Image (cartoon, grey):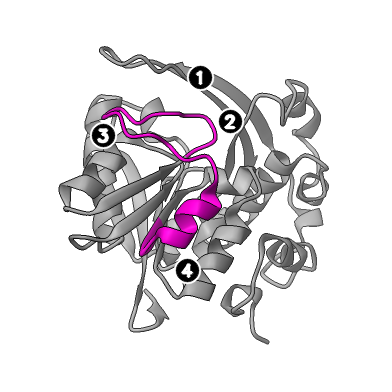
Amino acid sequence: MTHPQMQAQMTIETLLEAILDGALGPNPANLTVTGASQIYQTTKFSGTAARYHNYYMLLRVEDAFGACSHTKDQVGTEAAAELSGSPLSDALRDERLPVRIAAMDAYLGTVYPHRQFSSGPLTIPPGTPIEKANLRDPAIADLAAITPGQQVALIGVVNPLVEAIQARDAFCLPCDLQLEMTNNGQPVERDMEVVLERADSIICTGMTLSNGSFDRIVTRARERAIPLTVYAQTGSAIAARFVGAGVTALLAEPFPFTQFSSETSQLYTYQMQGGERT
């Protein structure tokens, strides 16, 4: 049987259905959410004007954490109290999208652990959040194989990644629903269709999973036959299933994320080479 992750038209919904049907591994009704956490974090770096407000839903299943960053109004504070101890299948059917994404990520992280299925690890040494980002984000640009003169859509603005794109003499097309300006003063587009149409290459973050735009981005990359690179904290194990099915490369950053640890962080790369996943 051909698994859904190898199907050219796979979507988040078809992947969820395959998980619930037990087509990819164990029946999720037989797995338990042993821990559920919600994190609210703010970040404001010295010398910058922006304060970032970050919300995370985390579900622990077996040896994996499923993670989903979301907006304030998507998930209430009651979620963590409700979900621990429940069958994973309940969380996969939850009406709240971030809960479903975190549950899918937990399931796939258990069945397809990054340490076994990725192209290889990327070790980020101890450091501050900015030091870690300044090592991580050029690696994302390297995975995207950016060339001079390219127009690169960046959906989900990460300022060190904007700089990494520009450092390769490419043109960054930033798109974000929360930001109006990059750190270097470039206006940020809100309508992703604008940048998806102009781009020669796309980079998006895992937040596109939690706001429901991921399928559209993958569809446009397929239609236009242009490379799509994903940087994912949210849903990193989900994005990995799309490598070879619309996604060209992935930098997966499972929990605990670099911003939560001053110690060594282990990230994982996925790449297509010669039409095959490596």
Image location of residue 128, percent across then percent down: 25, 24
Image location of residue 266, percent across then percent down: 34, 45
Between 238 and 138, which is closer to the camera in this rendering? 138
Q: Is residue 270 left or right of residue 217?
A: left
- Residue carrying label 4: 243
Q: CA distance from mark 3 to mark 4?
A: 25 Å
- Residue carrying label 3: 132
Name the residue type under label 4: Val
Name the residue type under label 2: Tyr
Q: CA distance from mark 4 to mark 1?
A: 30 Å
**Can residue 233 be seen here?**
yes
- Residue carrying label 2: 56
Residue at 74% across, 45% down: 32
Q: Which mark is residue 108?
A: none
**Can residue 245 be seen here?**
no
Image location of residue 111, percent across then percent down: 59, 62
* Residue 189 on the magenta segment: yes
Between 164 and 276, which is closer to the camera in this rendering? 164
* Residue 60 on the magenta segment: no
Circle 3 crowding by C-alpha within 10 Å: few under 14, some 14–19, many from 20: many
Label located before the other in sequence (3 or 4): 3
**Region of the chain picked out in magenta, as a range:** 176-202
- Residue carrying label 1: 41
Label located before the other in sequence (2 or 3): 2
Q: CA distance from mark 2 to mark 3?
A: 20 Å
Residue at 36% across, 27% down: 261
Q: CA distance from mark 1 to mark 2?
A: 8 Å
